[in-house]
Amino acid sequence: MTDLVRQEIATAAHRIIVKVGTRVLTREDGTLDRDRIKNLAQQINSLLDAGRQVVLVSSGAVGAGMSQLGLRQRPKDLAHLQAVAAIGQTNLIEAYDFHFREHGRHAAQILLTAEDLKHRTSYLNVRNTLLRLLEIGAVPIVNENDTVAVDELATTFGDNDRLAALMTNVVQAQLLVILSDVEGLYDGDPSEAGSKIVPTVAVIDDSIHALVRDKKSGLSKGGMASKLEAARIATTAGENVVIAPGRGESTLVDVADGKSVGTLFLAQGKIISPFKRWIGFSAQTQGSIVVDDGAARAISTNGRSLLAIGISDVSGSFEKGDVVAIRDANACELARGLTNYSAADVLRIKGLKSDEIATALGHRPYDEVIHRDNLVVIDR
């Protein structure tokens, strides 16, 4: 079934990020399922033939390594995991390349760590490379660099759901499709007969987070909680997200055709510029500025700049031009931005009116501590 909203979103989605998880790409014994990769390549090729551009964010390196080594259980220790991932990554990309070449396509391997997106120069390098690959009709296959990214293997922080959301921001894709081992977001426990898929989520709020029912597994590190966080990142930047069943033979094509598959998360507000996407979701913060309730409302609701009068505290050591987090009185992060003043200077001018800054510092280069043009709200 096709609805008008999904049809409109699908029609506008010229550039799509597809994320496929470990559970989708592996068999029950944890080894790589090459038939699934073949089917995925066929579906992506159909999208490319229709004039769309696709970036694939793929897990599965550890599963591929297990296949190569004949392992039946996922290794427990970090060094062993990294070794298996290193072996599996070559097998994984070879499988993709083989099946994309069947359609006359080229697969391009991009291995990243969080550090590659935190710094503006390397972030732009990644963006430029991806855009050029898309221009020449290749299929970029992005994965966390498991052999060196400790957090990716040891915890759920930095998993490929988040990486896919960041890739959506890097290349300004209009749609993120997360192919999962579940049908979508359920309104109850998926194992219970009465539970149904939530077709559309307008806002990711506490009621939506309450629906998460994660299962622990030796294969996948993400779970629905991380998928919701990925959806939050992408929708906050103004893009749409679909969580859909990854084992369906035509799921990706159906989503691109605007059919009612899985759960659709609607974009929130206006599309954020590439520069603000880097500030809000990829850059590394160097400290925090705590604001009072009035300043928090002005920033999050009214789109205002941060003035010194609304600042109550400062933490960390940052300089002019650094990215800092803006937190409310409860220490919740509500925005990020480029500061016009160092931490030491902010401490001296906090609580002051703008026309009092010159008296405190001897000069007043800026009226705003963070101008709204360099500020992005990350919790609406």
Image (spheres, grey):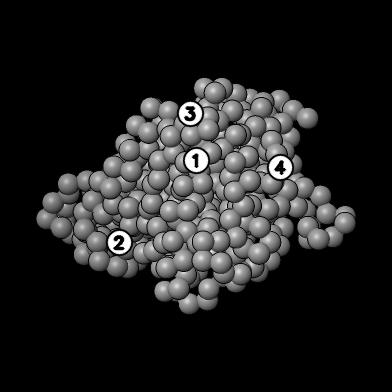
> In the rendered structure, which disc, 3 or 2, sits on the residue that comes first in sequence?
3
Left or right, 28 with respect to 239, comes to right
Disc 3 marks a residue whose amino acid type is: Gly
User: Can you see residue 158?
Assistant: no
> In the rendered structure, which disc, 2 or 1, sits on the residue that comes first in sequence?
1
In the image, 136 versus 127, the foreground residue is: 136
Q: Are marks 4 and 3 in contact (CB under 8 Å)?
A: no
Disc 1 marks a residue whose amino acid type is: Phe
The residue at 40%/57% (across/down) is: 145
Residue assigned mark 2: 286
In the image, 142 versus 69, the foreground residue is: 69
- Residue 153 location (% of width, % of height): 47, 67
In the image, 45 versus 170, the foreground residue is: 45
Q: Residues within 10 Å of mark 3 (few under 14, many from 20)?
A: few
The image quadrant of residue 256 is top right
Q: Are marks 2 and 4 in contact (CB under 8 Å)?
A: no
User: Can you see residue 31?
Assistant: yes
Q: Which type of secondary structure does the marked residue at label 1 adopt?
A: helix
**Whole-number angstrom distance, CA of label 2 to CA of label 1:** 44 Å
Q: Residues within 10 Å of mark 1 (few under 14, many from 20)?
A: some
